[in-house]
Image (cartoon, rainbow, N blue to C red):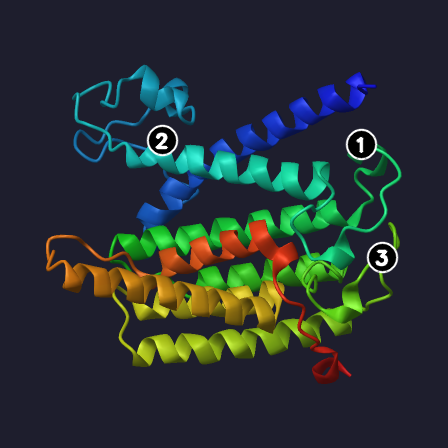
Amino acid sequence: MIDYLTFLATVVFVFYAFICGACFGSFLNVVVWRLPRKMPILLARSHCPRCKNDILASDNIPIWGWLRLKGRCRNCQERISIKYPLVEFAVAILFAILFLLIVVMHGVTLPQGWLGKHYGGWLSEFPRCPLFAFSLHQMVLGYILLAIALIDEDRMKSPWRILIFGCLLHVAFAYWKPVVGQIDSPLAQINGLNIPSLTFFDAMKYSLLGGVTGAIFGGLSRLCKVPHQSGNALQQQILLGIFLGPIVATWASVIAASSLAAQIVSNRFLKNRSTQVTGLPLQIFCAWLLILLTWRWWPMIDTSAFLT
């Protein structure tokens, strides 16, 4: 029998996650353009780069504003890149999918120990279920990883304050729910809806181990002189390790490096020099998303010896 209240709540909350994602995607476009160029982010209004006129609030609505103006500036008719609504739509879809898979579907793609025993619909557990905190945690991580990847695709250097800001947000999450960054740790397996008795200190130890692991792989990527800005990949790998621990940092680095190597080899084999090679940060973002969507089927690795 269909629970219409839960169904309606699911539609509303997923749609709300989509709308929030679109708004954050609009802000991401601002961050990607202004932050590496040391321009003000919060104090300056959005404006057309050609005629310098401020963009009206009604024209600045994510996705809809671009469609309404048919991809052109209202004043000078300069073309507005389709990249902007695509970024807004991508972040909107990302937020909606993460909320749906992690919260509504009880973390169906997460490691087996995190599925737990759920005695009702997600609405009856919301928001006390630790999966809600983990969904927000991953939205923040994915958002920052995508920001660095887009900056890298513009051939710009991501400032290190992005990494510092991300670390501070992770510390806040770990203080709220120490378990959020240790999903793949044997110490963090849940029993039903009971949160393991992990402490903030446990979370920081795991994050530190992950950050060191990410820094090692990031250092290797700099030595290998990967395309674009290798320092951007280093920031991402450190963030992945801090947010999700050493195992995920290792997996993501191996997947991203393999994908990038396959792309380079295929271009040389086909002798297609006109095709641009995407940077390692974009590969790392895709690797993080792939792991998050298939995590349940990855082998379990016991890291408890390093944490005791």
- Helix or strand or loop: what does disc 1 sit on? helix
Say if mark 3 contacts mark 2, CB within 8 Å. Answer: no
Q: Residue at x 82, y 32 (%)?
A: 121
Q: Are marks 1 and 3 in contact (CB under 8 Å)?
A: no
Q: Does 132 appear above or below 113?
A: above
User: What's the residue type where badge 2 is placed?
Assistant: Pro
Count neighbours of disc 1 (C-alpha within 10 A) and say few if under 14, some if 14 to 19, many if 20 or more: some
Looking at the rendered structure, the secondary structure element under dot 2 is helix
Residue located at (65% from left, 46% from top)? 135
Q: Amino acid at mark 3?
A: Ile
Q: Is residue 276 left or right of residue 55?
A: left
Q: Earlier in the sequence, mark 1 or mark 3?
A: 1
Q: Position of residue 258 (x, y in %)?
A: 37, 66
Identify whether 167 is placed above or below 224. above
User: Which numbered disc, 1 or 2, marks the residue closer to the eye?
Assistant: 1
The foreground one among 38 and 16 is 16
- Depth check: give the residue in front, 230 or 248: 248
Mark on residue 195?
3
Q: CA distance from mark 3 to mark 2?
A: 39 Å
On the image, the x and y values in percent for residue 224 come to 29, 78
In the rendered view, tell whether residue 23 sits above or below residue 203.
above
Whole-percent x and y of residue 222? 33, 77
Residue under the image location 38 percent in, 38 percent down = 87
Neighbours of disc 3 within 10 Å: few (<14), some (14-19), many (20+)? some
Which sits in the foreground, 285 or 25? Answer: 285
Q: Which residue is mark 1?
A: 123
Quadrant the C terminus occupies: bottom right
Q: In the rendering, which numbered label is found on residue 85?
A: 2
x, y percent for residue 53: 24, 27
Marks 3, 2: nearer the viewer: 3
Q: How would you rate the neighbour count of disc 2 (Cα within 10 Å): few for under 14, some for 14-19, many for 20 or more?
A: many
Q: Earlier in the sequence, mark 1 or mark 2?
A: 2
